[in-house]
Amino acid sequence: MRAAASLLATLAASAISCGDDGAPALDGAPTTRARESSHARIDRLRSLGYLVFAEGDDAAGAARSGVVRHDRARTQPGYRWYNEQNRAAAVLIDADGRVLHRVEDVDGTYWARAELLPGGDVLAVGAANRGERRSEIEDEDRYVARFAWDGGLRWKRSIGAHHDVEVLPDGRILALVMEPRRIPAVDPDVDVRDDFVVELDGDGRER
């Protein structure tokens, strides 16, 4: 973990201190990155982990959607629960790929995580639908929300949540959130998004 953190720190420093061609910026010489907003600069770094998601031919992708191969001898029987990567929705399917149930936030852009709780509720980490691209989503529009099995919203808390959430055995909820913070050693003029863990109770109240 420390080695990975060190590598990310090195990448961050390189992306901030280098010009567009990857060469170190000369002292006093403005670069394109230096003129970008803090969100745009940070989104460049955050995109590194998502290079495997590349847009392609929609028709070709549609032809390979759904279950494209099913080897029953090598498949675990039962149901599958997953959240759709580019929608604020989670889906329950059977072993043949048939959709049995779907829970969706019609006001959302996407869900990064959707936990199916023992009572049938769904706990989601997502973002509100205010822009066309993820890079346009403001931190204050990122939320943790709890939905009933029928899709009804129980509560939603816009706390800058992202990526993950954990429900403890006693019902408390731990959410990963990010907040802007100035770290002079990284950049004296631009805020970074720093990670914190926020504790909520079962009704979404911050503890």
Image (cartoon, rainbow, N blue to C red):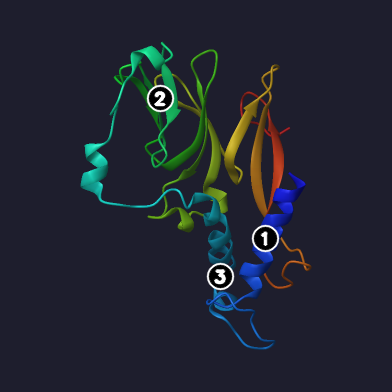
In the foreground, 107 or 186: 186
Residue appearing at x 33%, y 18% in the figure: 71
Specify the quadrant of the image occupied by residue 91.
Answer: top left
Q: Position of residue 139 (x, y in %)?
A: 57, 52
Q: Nearer the viewer, mark 3 or mark 2?
A: 3
Q: Which of the two discs, 3 and 1, labels the residue nearer the N terminus?
A: 3
Q: Which amino acid does label 1 sit on?
A: Val
Q: Name the residue under label 1.
A: 192
Q: Position of residue 205 (x, y in %)?
A: 66, 31
In the displayed structure, 149 sits above or below 4; it is: above
10 Å neighbourhood of mark 3: few (<14), some, or many (≥20)?
Answer: few
| Secondary structure of the residue carrying numbered label 3 | loop
Q: Name the residue under label 3.
A: 37
| Secondary structure of the residue carrying numbered label 1 | strand
Q: Report the side of 57 relative to 53 (left or right).
A: left
Residue appearing at x 58%, y 78% in the figure: 19
In the displayed structure, 27 sits above or below 15; it is: below
Q: Which amino acid does label 3 sit on?
A: Ser
Q: Mark 2 points at which residue?
A: 151
Q: What residue type is labelled 2?
A: Gly
Specify the quadrant of the image occupied by residue 183.
Answer: bottom right
How far separated are the C-alphas under marks 2 and 1? 35 Å
Asked if residue 191 shows in the view, the reply is: no
Asked if residue 4 shows in the view, the reply is: yes
